[in-house]
Amino acid sequence: MPARTPPLLRKVQNLSAMPSKNAQSRVADSVIAQLEQKILSGELVNGEPLPAERDLMESFGASRTVIREAILALSNRGLIESKPRYRPIVRKPNYETILNATGQIVQNLLTETGDVKNLYDSRVFIERGLVREAAVAATKDCIADLKAALAANKAAISDSAAFYETDVAFHGVLYRVCNNPIFPAIHMGYTAWLAPHWDKMLRSPERNELNFHAHQAILAAIMERDPDAAEDALKSHLDAAWEHVRTTFTQ
Amino acid sequence: MPARTPPLLRKVQNLSAMPSKNAQSRVADSVIAQLEQKILSGELVNGEPLPAERDLMESFGASRTVIREAILALSNRGLIESKPRYRPIVRKPNYETILNATGQIVQNLLTETGDVKNLYDSRVFIERGLVREAAVAATKDCIADLKAALAANKAAISDSAAFYETDVAFHGVLYRVCNNPIFPAIHMGYTAWLAPHWDKMLRSPERNELNFHAHQAILAAIMERDPDAAEDALKSHLDAAWEHVRTTFTQ
DNA sequence: ATCTTAGTTTGGTCGTACCAAAACGGGGAT
DNA sequence: ATCCCCGTTTTGGTACGACCAAACTAAGAT
C-alpha cells in the first residue's frame, strides 16, 4: 500500500502546485469531463433529454451524488438545460449559452448605478463602431433591413410597448452589419441586462417620436456613407436616452 | 436551542412540508439565494472561508445534500472559489468573475477556426474604436502610459517571450482610455481566450520589430489626434498579425 | 523555536430511503 | 380510432448516516 505523503514532503510539493492546475482528482470532475465530451462530440444529441440519473450512475460507475454534481455543473456551464423537476436537456453551446450562463453574475454586478452606467457606456461604444461600420460597408440588404426597422418604429409610435420592441429591433440590425454572430449575442446581452433598468423609464408617444427621428437621422447618415455623422447621431441618440432615464428618477 | 428534528418525525412533517402546491422551487434554490444575499451584503466577508458544510446545514436547517448543491452552484457563479479539498472562499463578484465563469464555455465555442476568427474580429472591432477614442480624448497620463508601453516593446524585441508580455501590455493601455472597468476585463478575456491559438504562432525578433513599429505608428497617429489614421494603423497591425497566424499553419 | 505526531475537523463519495411530480400506459367513453 | 381519465412506474429532489482521506490543529519531542 502506498504510504500517505509524509508531511515533510507536502510543503515542498505545494511550492510547485499551481493554483489553478492543482487538480486533486475529484470523481465528479472526471464525470463532468466525460459528459462534456459526449455532448460536444454529439454522442449525447442536442435537444434530447439526458439519461436518467440512475442510468448515468451505472454507466459511469459513480454514485448518484457525483452524477448530480456533474449535471449541476454542466447545467451552470450551459451545456445542459435543467428545469426543476424535468429531465435535463442536452444543449450544445452557442453564443447565447454564454449569455444565459452569465446573466446571473452580471445582475449581481449591476447593483450600483455606476456599474449600469459603465455597461451602458460600453454599449454606446460598441454601437458607435457599428454605425461607422454600417456607414462604410453596409450592404444593400442591411440598408433595407434598417429601412424596414425604421418603418416599424414609425408604425408603433402610438403604442409604447410595441415601440420598445421595434426600438430594440432597429438597434439589433446594427449588430448584424459585421456578419459576426458574436455581435447579435452581445446585443441580446445588452437588451437583457439593461432592460430591468429601462423598464422604469417613462414612455410616451412624444418620446417614441423623438427616438424615431433619431433613428431616422442615423439611417440617413449611414445612407450618406458618412461615418462621422452616423456616429454623432447615434451618440446623441443614446446620450439623450440615458439622460432621460437618469432624470426620470433622479438617480 | 431547537433540537434537531428527529428522523422519526420526518415522515409526518413531510405531509405538511409543502409550502404550496405549485411551488416549483427547490430547497437548494432558497439556500442559494440566501447565501448569495449574505455574500453580496457582506455578511459573509469577501476572502474569508465559508462556514463548514455541517455548520451551514444546521443554520439553514437543510441537509448536506442541499448545502453542497448550493455551494457548487455559487461556485459555478463565481461567488465562491473552491479548491478541491479546501474550504471554499467567499468572493464578491467583479468583472473578472465573469471571465472566470465564462472561460470554460468560451473554450467550448472556439473549436472551429471560424469561431476564433469571429472572436478575433470582434477584438479588432473593439480596438479600432479604442484607438479612435484615444486619438480624440486620450489624456496626458494615457499618452504617457502608451509611450512607456512602447518603450517596453522596444526593449524586449530580442526576447520573444518578454515581447509578448509587453505587446499585450501595450494593447492593454488602449483598453483603459475609456476609464470604464469593463474594457480591461474584456482585454483580459481576449488575452486569455485567444492565447491558446496564438501560442502556436512563430515568434522572432524580426516579427517583434515589425509589431513594435506598428505600435509606434498607432501611437504617432494618436498623438497627432488623427482618429482615422490611428484606426487604419491599428487595423493593418492586427490584420497582419492574423494573417501571420493563419499562414503559419495553413489553417 | 521548530519539527514531528497524534487527534480532530472537514470536504468528497457512497448507499439507502422516501416523497411528489412527471412520464407512461391501459382501458373506457366518445 | 381518438381522446380523456386514472392508476402505475419512473425519475428528480431531499434527507440521513457512514466512511475515507486530506487538511487542520495542537500537544509533545528535539
Image (spheres, coloured by chain):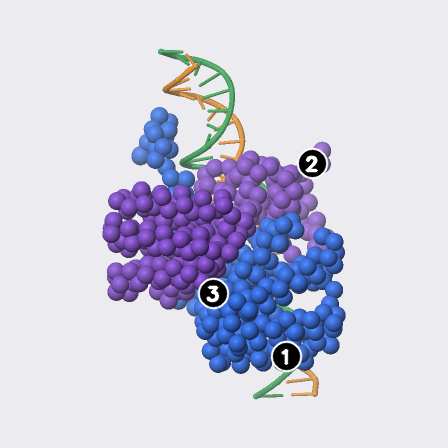
Chain colours: A blue, B purple, C orange, D green
The chain letter under disc 1 is A
- The numbered dot on residue A152 is 1
Q: Is B179 on the left-hand or right-hand side of B224?
A: right
Q: Residue at x 35, y 43 (%)?
A: B152
Q: Image height check: is B186 above or below B89?
A: below
Q: Is A206 on the left-hand or right-hand side of A100?
A: right
Q: Residue at x 37, y 46 (%)?
A: B150
**Structural crowding at the residue carrying mark 1, measured as other residues with C-alpha within 10 Å and reported as few (<14), some (14–19) or many (≥20):** some
The chain letter under disc 2 is B
Label 2 to label 3: alpha-carbon separation: 55 Å
Are discs 3 and 1 located on one and the same chain? yes
What secondary structure is marked by label 1? Answer: helix
- Label 2: which residue? B3
Query: Residue B202 versus residue A24: which sits nearer the camera?
Result: B202
Q: Image height check: is B178 above or below A163?
A: above
- Label 3: which residue? A182
The chain letter under disc 3 is A
